[in-house]
Image (cartoon, grey):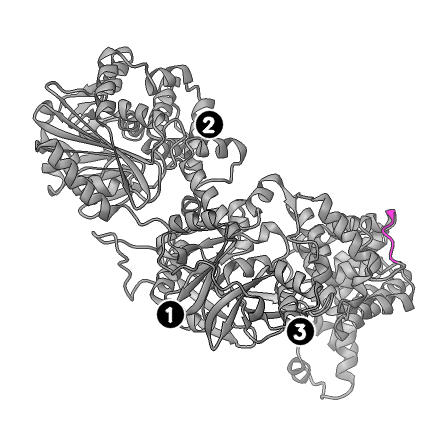
């Protein structure tokens, strides 16, 4: 007998998941192990389902126990008795995070989404099982109830997609709304008023919690709905209700903030749930005593709010006390900063601001010492100071720059920008509309930890967590940055993983390589390292949920990691290569090209998955916009102009008007003339690789960027047609799956300069600093193409073979695209597919066996054999031997 059950206080997520699982196990009997919530009972009155009574179940006959929405043995009533019974198969479908002593199943489908009903919906969708509109409505009801109508922070993208699928299958939102948020009756209103009158405020580590107590003789089963209403009414971070009913204490918890995980609190009292909503039932104790005990426990459970060390910028650019104001001005300009801490003998003495430096220089003090104009009485702070204290201090003192001091040494700094960002993030966390608004505005704005779990292979996610663990051990911050994060948010696969650490990158890479395996390559000059071939293992779990990998387990695949120290850079002159120095993650991200590439994800365990977005990259991803970080971006690196067009074309994004203006300014200032050819060449080849050549070159031409390569380069209609034909020809060749690969970059470059004369071609290629062999290949290829177009005889296979055997495949493809003569195209195709591989089957030893002595005529014999085979006159080895004997023996 199959039994489908849930936890002892059945809600809509339980009921809908049980009904959904019954579609997978049609013989399964639905059984509540305890009571059902009031709204569930009301639903069953109008939509009756066959629910068996637990007292009617023969436990000895149960062969398969299917549990939904829990894996806690204490929450399945009498079914706990058969969990470990020999011969009983346990199946689990649940969305709660794992904890110790969970039931283990032979089949487990455990995913941390907003509702178990989401998991069941996905399975039904994958298996293409039919279901009635009321079944779709019930599953939708389960998701809506468990996710607060998709508003709780535990809601994931998968929950939203599941609801969309159910609506397509006939889910009725009128029914859903009638049960998810029913009106409050008189009893509920009286209960609500009783609770509100007892609410007391408790602030722990900056988290505002309200605790209420109610005592009732009879059981009130809609307390969860009352708790939800209180959270709607009160501007608080969390709520805890202590309800004394029928000789038991019911605890109900709700939380809006990540600092307080209600599931952790309820776990201590034998309950469970989620970070945002959880509950527990315990034996009766005096509520006031229990309240005091809970407050003490909250002091342990509530995570400390952010400290200065969590948000400070480190390291900080400083200036020596006896340096001149001229040097101070130079440093501020070079590093784009507004404040310089002043140091004497390694000890912090004060700071000078840009405003003070500029005014002092204006008044003629350019040679004066920095110390003479330093602010020495400004407030300072330590690394372990709560950020909330700094907020008050900086606002009250009107201080824009807060030095962070440790034993007299400046180890970091907090600016007003840092502070405003923290305040804004806290506002978003506490905003009740955050999840709903972001879901409507932007499908990619969601919990980053959830995105990591949804979009990364488990073994890659485990590797990133390992990076965070080792960073914690080393006492440094680690981040995954750049294109990996950008493409994660865009739901596009990108396994080029770049790790940046606020510490010694090479030393960290060594620690990491020892723990995760792989080969390490070090580049000391740049402070970077690469770990190659890191083995990726499939995650295996034991009862405690810990990694249970053994030496016998073979890795599924391997991956590479690039590790770098957080750096800042400055340019000594326009278009030069940058000078790089150690810095903070904020400065490291600031040196990147566009806002969409400045995103980072923190990997340290305390904040694993936290998105770092200093420069509006997420906004520009949402809006589909390519935007530079500052007005000097193209002056410092003009290749970014080409890259802007490349990203725009690749992602289908717009280039912001201001960025377009800066591209035109870079051309006007002739900055590309100072750019090395090698950098232009590399950027161009990447552009050809990632985009369709015809489209990208047309865009580059519109911005005037083609003339950077050569003033005579024009994007004409003929060039556009040829580029499109080249694109089609390359696609055709790739579908042949021939052994010889093509250099598509060189081929596109050949097409681009094909309308220039010979002298102009050479000038253009040298401007790009094209590698000598590639330059020769392109120049000779264009000459060969002109010659072959005239001399190739489509009907003569020998002629085709002789003319093409020394020609590069890129030249042949160029001819096919450039000359639309179908016969010549067919001739080249015939060579690539068939003629190229034709050769005589007989060898020299075969000639010796038939009496032909080795000598010069061997060459003549084999050449004649080849021509005959090309003409199709000799089919096999036997015919070849007969031909030789007839024509070359006496």
Which residue is tagged 1? Answer: 407
- Residue depth check, mark 3 versus mark 2: number of the one nearer the observer: 3
Residue 326, image quadrant: bottom right
Q: Could you tell me which quadrant the N terminus lies in? A: top left
Q: Which mark is residue 367?
A: 3
Q: Which mark is residue 164?
A: 2
Magenta-highlighted residues:
713-717
Dot 3 or dot 2, earlier in sequence:
2
Separation of residues labelled 3 and 1 (CA atoms): 31 Å
Residue 262, image quadrant: top left
Give the residue displayed 32% in from the left and 14% down from the top: 183
- In the image, 550 versus 234, the foreground residue is 234
Q: Secondary structure at mark 3?
A: loop
Give the residue displayed 47% in from the left and 51% down from the top: 397
> Answer yes or no: do the residues labelled 3 and 1 have beta carbons within 8 Å?
no
Q: Is residue 572 above or below residue 711?
A: below
């Amino acid at each position: 007998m199959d039994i489908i059950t849930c936890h002892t206080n059945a809600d809509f997520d339980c009921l809908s998941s049980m009904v959904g699982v019954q579609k997978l196990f049609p013989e399964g009997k639905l059984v509540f192990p305890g009571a059902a919530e009031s709204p569930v009972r009301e639903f069953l009155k109008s939509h009756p389902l066959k629910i068996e009574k637990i007292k009617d179940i023969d436990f000895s006959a149960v062969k398969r126990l299917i549990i939904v929405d829990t894996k806690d043995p204490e929450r399945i009533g009498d079914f706990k008795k058969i969990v470990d019974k020999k011969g009983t198969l346990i199946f689990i479908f649940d969305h709660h995070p794992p904890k110790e002593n969970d039931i283990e199943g032979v089949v487990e489908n455990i995913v941390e989404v907003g509702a178990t009903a989401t998991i069941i919906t996905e399975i039904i969708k994958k298996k293409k099982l039919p279901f009635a509109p009321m079944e779709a409505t019930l599953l939708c009801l389960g998701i809506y109830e468990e996710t607060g109508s998709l508003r709780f922070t535990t809601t994931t993208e998968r929950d939203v997609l599941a609801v969309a699928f159910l609506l397509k299958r006939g889910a009725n939102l009128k029914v859903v709304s009638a049960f998810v948020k029913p009106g409050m009756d008189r009893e509920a209103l009286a209960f609500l008023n009783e609770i509100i009158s007892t609410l007391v405020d408790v602030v722990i580590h900056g988290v505002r919690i309200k605790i209420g107590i109610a005592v009732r003789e009879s059981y009130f089963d809609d307390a969860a709905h009352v708790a939800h209403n209180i959270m709607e009414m009160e501007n608080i971070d969390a709520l805890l209700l202590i309800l004394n009913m029928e000789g038991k204490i019911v605890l109900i918890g709700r939380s809006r903030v990540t600092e307080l995980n209600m599931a952790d609190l309820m776990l201590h009292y034998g309950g469970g749930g989620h970070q945002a909503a959880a509950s527990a039932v315990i034996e009766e104790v005096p509520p006031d005593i229990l309240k005091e005990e809970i407050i003490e426990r909250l002091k342990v459970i509530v995570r400390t709010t952010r400290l200065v060390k969590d948000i400070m910028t480190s390291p900080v650019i400083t200036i020596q006390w006896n340096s001149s104001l001229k040097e101070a001005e130079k440093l501020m300009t070079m590093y784009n900063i507004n404040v310089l801490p002043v140091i004497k003998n390694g000890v912090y003495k004060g700071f000078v601001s840009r405003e003070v430096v500029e005014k002092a220089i204006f008044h003629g003090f350019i040679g004066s010492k920095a110390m003479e104009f330093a602010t020495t009485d400004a407030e300072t702070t330590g690394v372990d100071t709560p950020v909330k204290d700094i907020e008050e201090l900086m606002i009250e003192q009107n201080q824009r720059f807060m030095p962070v001091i440790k034993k007299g040494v400046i180890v970091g700094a907090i600016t007003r920008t840092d502070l405003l960002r923290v305040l804004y993030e806290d506002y978003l966390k506490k905003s009740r509309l955050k999840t709903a608004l972001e879901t409507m505005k932007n499908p990619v704005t969601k919990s980053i930890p959830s995105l990591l779990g949804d979009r990364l292979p488990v073994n890659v996610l485990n590797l990133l967590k390992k990076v965070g663990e080792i960073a914690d051990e080393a006492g440094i911050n680690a981040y995954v940055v750049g294109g990996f994060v950008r493409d994660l948010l865009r739901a596009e696969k990108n396994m080029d993983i770049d790790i940046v650490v606020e510490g010694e990158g090479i030393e960290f890479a060594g620690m990491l390589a020892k723990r995760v395996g792989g080969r390490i390559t070090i580049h000391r000059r740049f402070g970077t390292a690469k770990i190659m071939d890191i083995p990726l293992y499939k995650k295996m779990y034991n009862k405690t949920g810990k990694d249970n990998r053994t030496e016998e387990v073979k890795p599924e695949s391997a991956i590479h990691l690039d590790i770098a120290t957080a750096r800042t850079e400055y340019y000594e002159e326009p278009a030069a290569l940058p000078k790089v120095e150690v810095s903070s993650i904020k400065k490291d991200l600031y040196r990147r090209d566009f806002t969409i590439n400045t995103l980072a994800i923190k990997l340290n365990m305390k904040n694993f998955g936290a998105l770092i977005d200093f420069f509006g990259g997420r906004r520009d991803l949402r809006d589909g916009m390519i935007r530079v970080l500052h007005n000097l971006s193209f002056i410092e690196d003009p290749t970014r102009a080409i890259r802007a067009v490349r990203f725009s074309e690749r992602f289908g994004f717009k280039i912001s008007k201001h960025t377009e203006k800066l591209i035109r300014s870079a051309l006007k200032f002739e900055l590309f003339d100072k750019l090395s050819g090698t950098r232009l060449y590399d950027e161009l080849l990447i552009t050809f690789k990632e985009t369709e050549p015809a489209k990208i070159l047309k865009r580059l031409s519109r911005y005037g960027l083609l003339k950077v390569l050569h003033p005579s380069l024009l994007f004409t209609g003929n060039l556009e047609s040829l580029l499109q034909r080249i694109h089609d020809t390359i696609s055709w060749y790739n579908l042949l799956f021939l052994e010889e690969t093509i250099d598509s970059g060189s081929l596109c470059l050949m097409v681009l300069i094909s309308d220039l004369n010979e002298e102009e071609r050479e000038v253009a290629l040298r401007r790009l600093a094209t590698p000598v062999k590639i330059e020769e290949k392109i120049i000779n290829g264009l000459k060969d193409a002109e010659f072959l177009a005239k001399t190739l005889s489509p009907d003569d296979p020998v002629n085709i073979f002789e003319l093409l055997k020394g020609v590069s495949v890129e030249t042949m493809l160029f001819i096919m695209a450039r000359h639309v003569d179908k016969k010549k195209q067919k001739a080249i195709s015939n060579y690539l597919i068939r003629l190229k591989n034709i050769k005589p089957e007989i060898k020299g030893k075969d000639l010796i066996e038939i009496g032909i002595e080795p000598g010069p005529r061997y060459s003549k014999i084999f050449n004649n054999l080849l021509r005959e085979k090309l003409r199709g006159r000799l089919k096999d080895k036997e015919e070849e031997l007969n031909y030789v004997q007839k024509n070359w023996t006496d």
